[in-house]
Image (spheres, rainbow, N blue to C red):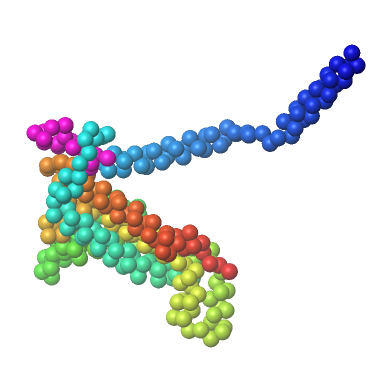
Amino acid sequence: MSAIVEHHAVAHGLAARGWQAVRKMPRLRIRFGTIVTVAYFIVIFTILLAPLVVVIGGSFSAPASDKVVMSYVQFPPERLTLEWYGKIPKAQLKALGVSFLLGTAVALGACLLGVPAAIGLVRGRFAGKPVVSAVMRAPLQIPHVVSGIAFLQLFYAIGDLGGFYAQGTTAGLFIGHLFMATPFVIGSVAAVLQRCNPRLEEAAYVLGASEWRTFRRVTLPLIGPGVFTGALYAFIVSFVDVPVAIFLASPAATTFPVELFNAMEQDFNPSSLASASLAAGFAIVLVFAAQRLVGLDSLLKPRTK
């Protein structure tokens, strides 16, 4: 009898120790806020990536029969094919190259104009500074369709006076896109420059550095994240623009979005999806290459120390 009692006591002690050990184990708590955050990001990424997935998936779709002419988007594809990538019109490939070169030129031009303007607005002291700042940011408030019509009329007026009509030329597209993109560089550089310590530049002057050397060795590294962000925005604004380019483009100078818009409006087939997929793929590869070679994380950290 005593053995049985002793056995029950030992069992009870082991059970109590086991329960205490379980209670001391860290509990996996999933908070309601965490669930809402995860669900929110899932919805956001779905909204952002779903159109891209449909476009890329539709570019690989083949008709159910070789006798069927596809003039529609089929997703998910019933049959896979690379046929549409070989049928991309040369006009779209040419327009894609024009858009990339134009976007690069606009990004460089916007930086050349926007960086000095931002430094002047932040570091300068002059009368009417708020008015000048508002004027430089005015293109952000003007609808792009209005800007396109305004530039079209302006180029016609200049052509009537001087004989050179800029509409329908790459130069006209460059001017119109530069007008829209420069405020992005001004805003991003000014935002970074306002957080930088001006005493760093003053220290460089005290140590005998010239204005150019101070800008190149001190100011430019400080505003590097803003310059990079502004240039990226300027490139994107130029590359995806339709409202301004549709007024200023011509068969000799057409951007990729306008060419794609005309192709889908007149005679749509999945080759347009294939060219759009190439553009999206190039953009993704470009971002990953920049991250790998340059390191976007380091560029986005302003050097204020």
**Which residue is located at x 24 percent, y 35 percent?**
77
Q: Is residue 188 visible?
A: no
**Front residue of this view, candidates 127 and 71:** 71
Query: Residue 238 lies in what quarter of the image?
Result: bottom left
Residue 130 on the magenta segment: no
**Residue shown at 45% from the left, 77% from the top:** 216
Picture quadrant of residue 69:
top left
Image position, residue 5 (x, y; %):
87, 17
**Image: magenta residue range:** 57-72
| Numbered label tally | 0
Q: Is residue 50 above or below residue 254?
A: above
Mark yes or no: residue 258 visible.
yes
Q: For this view, does 208 lie left or right of residue 3? A: left
Residue 252: give x, y in percent of width and height. Answer: 12, 60
Q: Residue at x 15, y 41 (%)?
A: 268
Residue 67 on the magenta segment: yes
| Dominant secondary structure of the residues highlighted in magenta in the image | loop
Quadrant occupied by the C terminus: bottom right
Horizontally, is 248 left or right of 118 in the view?
Answer: left
